Image (spheres, rainbow, N blue to C red):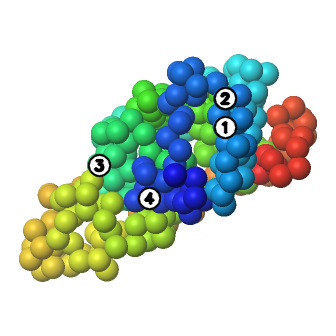
Amino acid sequence: HRVHAYARSISSPLLAFEGCSRLSPYLAWGCLSMREVVQASRRRSGRGVSSFGSRLHWHCHFIQKLESEPAIEFQDFHPFMRGIRAMDDVRFQAWAEGCTGVPFVDACMRALRAHGWINFRMRAMLMSFASYHLWLPWRQSGLHLARQFVDYEPGIHWSQCQMQSGSTSINTIRIYNPVKQGQDHDPRGEFIRQWCPELASVPDVYLHEPWRLDAATAERVGCRIGVDYPAPLVEPAAAAREAKDRIWAIRREAGFDRIADAIQQRHGSRRAGLSAT
């Protein structure tokens, strides 16, 4: 019954818990085989079947990457990307506990910690925020997420950690804007208020950026930033710009493209419609 709403449900954490197939733990632990799921899905009809089928293809595509190069669990695809980030224990702990001061990020992390599952777009955003905005090493952030996921699948997980951190060199630099993601996928703040009850009384206009609350309003609604809810570790837009500048500076270095071409030849998809970018 989920397949009919699948395509329109997979991006929003408000809808995805009931709209996604939720078969990933059963695949990861071997309770279902991929062949069984593929054959069953092909017997179904509906708007979401082809969308679901494409994700089964992606599942196998990414597992094959790890099969062909197991080292990607531990080191960057591209050698120019190695060692560019340094561990910051304060930032890491705040991110891991859902206390970054950026509501949509915190709500997603808290939901993940409670359920052991969250939808793919939110996983990507959590990883992107750690790697770009907080400039944390993807290996440490990836280990934390792996320990949360009830459906941890190494082949998918480590490629995605690197993709969402700009370390593959063959993928578009995609830095998720956590404020816009919240506005797009939780416009009324239902998800944020569920998982960040400290913000329950914050007016909608400030909910995705509560650090913009004036002192009088913050006092009136009982949410003082830095007291009742954390002040943001970084200013999201400024941190994203800085991260993008750093990554592009590396990509412009002599010899970068030659190695990236070799990585694309080895790991890029050969199938139309499954472009690595």
Q: Are marks 3 and 1 in contact (CB under 8 Å)?
A: no
Q: Are marks 4 and 2 in contact (CB under 8 Å)?
A: no
- At label 2, the amino acid type is Glu
Residue receiving disc 2: 36
**Is disc 2 placed on a helix, strand or loop?**
helix
Viewer-nearest residue: 273 or 136: 273
Q: Earlier in the sequence, mark 4 or mark 3?
A: 4
Name the residue tied to disc 1.
Answer: 40
Number of callouts: 4
Q: Nearer the viewer, residue 106 or 188?
A: 188
x, y percentage for residue 135? 51, 45
Badge nearest the viewer, 1 or 4: 1
Residue 99 marker = 3
The answer to whether residue 140 is visible is no
Which residue is label 4 attached to?
A: 15
Circle 3 or circle 2, nearest the eye: 2
Instruction: Determine whether the residue tagged by mark 4 lies in a helix, strand or loop.
Output: helix
Mark positioned earlier in the residue sequence (3 or 2): 2
Contact check, label 2 and label 1, Cβ < 8 Å: yes
Asked if labels 2 and 3 touch by Cβ distance under 8 angstroms, the answer is no
Considering only order in the chain, which callout, 2 or 4, is on the residue closer to the N terminus? 4
Quote the CA–CA distance across marks 3 and 1.
Answer: 41 Å
Give residue 87's position: percent from left, percent from top. Answer: 45, 34
Tell me if 25 is positioned left or right of 161 in this view: left
Task: Tell us which disc is closer to us: 4 or 3.
Answer: 4
